[in-house]
Amino acid sequence: MSVAVRRRFVVLISGQGTNMQAIVNRCRSEPLDADVVAVVSSRKGVPGVVWAASQGIATETVVAADFSSRETFDEALAACIDKFSPDYVLLAGFMRVLTPHFVKHYQGRLINIHPSLLPSFPGLHTHQQALARGVKVHGCTVHFVTALLDHGPIIAQGVVSVNDSDTVQSLGDKVLKLEHQVYSQVTAWLSKGLVSLTEDQRVDVSGMPRRIFFGDNHE
């Protein structure tokens, strides 16, 4: 009888870490053959680190201001992550642009969630951009990370309707709630070994041909 492989996740955060919390809770509630073995923050004393520590999860902080360049910061960050021998590194509100060398080091194992329906609205202020452009749907994207910012093979997306009454805050709240669902589900797929990249750099999730999620307000 084969023994199930427990996959190891390291989650990178910069603030509240609500997506990280959703991932931890998903790993523990089903339970999945996976563990969040460490949470690494780019900022000191943030609520996400406090929460992770309270859950008995190893925490580390690597602050960019302590290093002379992006390259030296990324080298220190990679050294910190590698201590935990992760199968996947999950970016969950990690507010740093990573160098190509760092991305290459974790190629095929580095995953991000972005608060828009990529390729629309890469970068910052995505909800403001969505409202300014008058789109009728908005959402989030979980994708493999490449050297090109907010690009890379898409694993799953979540969609919410944009209402005439929406503000940046209300739209952001709807998207964030859906992010928790989408990212934790992708974590479940990863834990089961269902996610792979095809030769043409598209994502295949075994047994899951439809990888789109809808918020409660979407009709």
Image: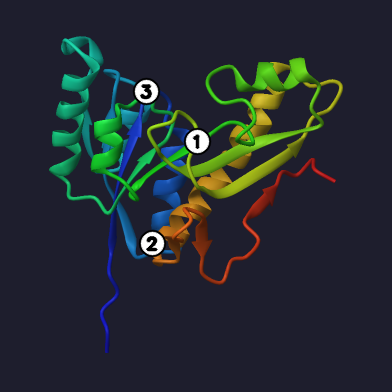
Please name whichever residue, 47 or 1, is drawn nearer the observer in this view of the structure: 1
Disc 3 + disc 1, Cβ < 8 Å: no
Instruction: Give the x, y percent position of residue 96.
Output: 36, 22
User: Which of the marked residues, 2 or 1, is nearer the chain's N terminus?
Assistant: 1
Frontmost of labels 3 and 2 is 3
Q: Amino acid at mark 1?
A: His
Q: Amino acid at mark 3?
A: Val
Q: Which residue is mark 3?
A: 97
- Residue on which disc 2 sits: 191
Give SS at disc 3: loop
Pick whichever of labels 3 and 2 is earlier in the sequence: 3
Query: Residue 173, percent across and down?
Result: 64, 28
- The reply to whether dot 3 and dot 2 touch (C-beta < 8 Å) is no
Neighbour tally class for label 2: few under 14, some 14-19, many 20 plus, Cα within 10 Å = many
Which residue position holds label 1? Answer: 151
Q: CA distance from mark 3 to mark 2?
A: 26 Å
Quarter of the image for the N terminus: give it.
bottom left
